Image (cartoon, rainbow, N blue to C red):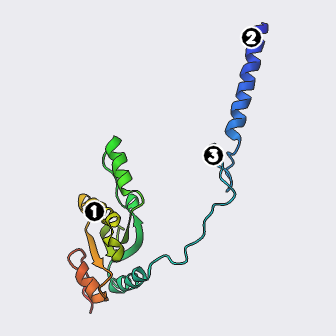
């Protein structure tokens, strides 16, 4: 009987230690972790960017929205490729594809307003696209869009874009309503 009592005490102590370890830092509040993992600090070293767009992206966005006014499309800026595409394989190929898409985005995604289905994307190519690193990132984007059969339209920031020139560039990919 004394051995059974000792076993019961050891089991109770282990259960207590396990429960206290799992509950430490597992608060569901804004400063703790909800899964019992590493607790969150009370603050992160972040600040809001002063500008969401570069000047050329801002100007182009305004032109694009004006061009699509009255059309059955909506524009989403800075869409992450991992949010846009579904990886259709498993295992190492899935991990490799995810890694290729990670931290990449497309400048503008145009979706149909009827069902929010992606129709095409626009990438603005400025001077930064001349670097070897950016050209590699662009090649990954081109491959991703080509693989998913989603048009990616590349436009230069060196050109002046008007609603009419933007509609011309999009015409092959969108069903545009004729303006009266």
Say which residue appears at 44% left-offset and 79% top-offset. Answer: 54
Judging from the image, what secondary structure is the residue with disc 1 in?
Answer: helix
Q: Secondary structure at mark 3?
A: loop
Q: Earlier in the sequence, mark 2 or mark 3?
A: 2
Name the residue rendered at 23%, 61% in the picture: 146
Q: Where 40 falls versus 3 (above or below)?
A: below
In the rendered structure, the answer to whether residue 43 lies left or right of residue 150 reads right
Q: Which residue is mark 3?
A: 38
Q: Is residue 14 visible?
A: yes
Above or below residue 98? Residue 126 is below
Q: At numbered mark 2, what does the secondary structure look like: helix, strand or loop?
A: helix
- Residue toward you, 74 or 134: 134
Q: Earlier in the sequence, mark 1 or mark 2?
A: 2
Residue 129, percent across and down? 33, 71
- Residue lying at the far top in this picture: please name it: 1
Which disc number belongs to residue 139? 1
Q: Nearer the viewer, mark 1 or mark 3?
A: 1
In this rendering, does residue 177 appear at all?
Answer: no
The CA distance from mark 2 to mark 3 is 36 Å
- Mark toward the start of the polypeptide (1 vs 3): 3
Residue 46 lies, in percent from the top left, at 60, 65
Q: Residue at x 32, y 75 (%)?
A: 125
Image-quadrant location for residue 25: top right
Badge 2 is on which residue? 4
Where the N terminus falls, by quadrant? Answer: top right
Do the residues under discs 1 and 3 have CB atoms within 8 angstroms? no
């Amino acid at each position: 009987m004394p051995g059974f009592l000792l076993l019961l005490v050891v089991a109770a102590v282990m259960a207590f230690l396990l429960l206290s370890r799992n509950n430490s830092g597992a608060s569901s509040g804004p400063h703790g972790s909800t899964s019992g993992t590493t607790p969150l600090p009370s603050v992160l070293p972040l600040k809001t960017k002063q500008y969401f767009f570069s000047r050329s992206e801002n100007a182009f966005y305004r032109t694009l929205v004006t061009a699509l006014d009255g059309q059955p499309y909506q524009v989403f800026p800075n869409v992450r490729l991992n949010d846009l595409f579904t990886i259709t394989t498993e295992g190492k190929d899935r991990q490799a594809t995810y890694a290729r898409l990670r931290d990449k985005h497309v400048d503008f995604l145009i979706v149909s307003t009827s069902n929010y289905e992606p129709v095409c994307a626009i990438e603005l190519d400025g001077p930064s696209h001349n670097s070897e690193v950016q050209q590699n990132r662009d090649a990954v984007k081109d491959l991703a869009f080509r693989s998913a059969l989603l048009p990616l339209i590349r436009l230069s920031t060196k050109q002046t874009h008007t609603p009419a020139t933007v509609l011309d560039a999009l015409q092959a990919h969108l069903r545009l309503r004729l303006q009266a």
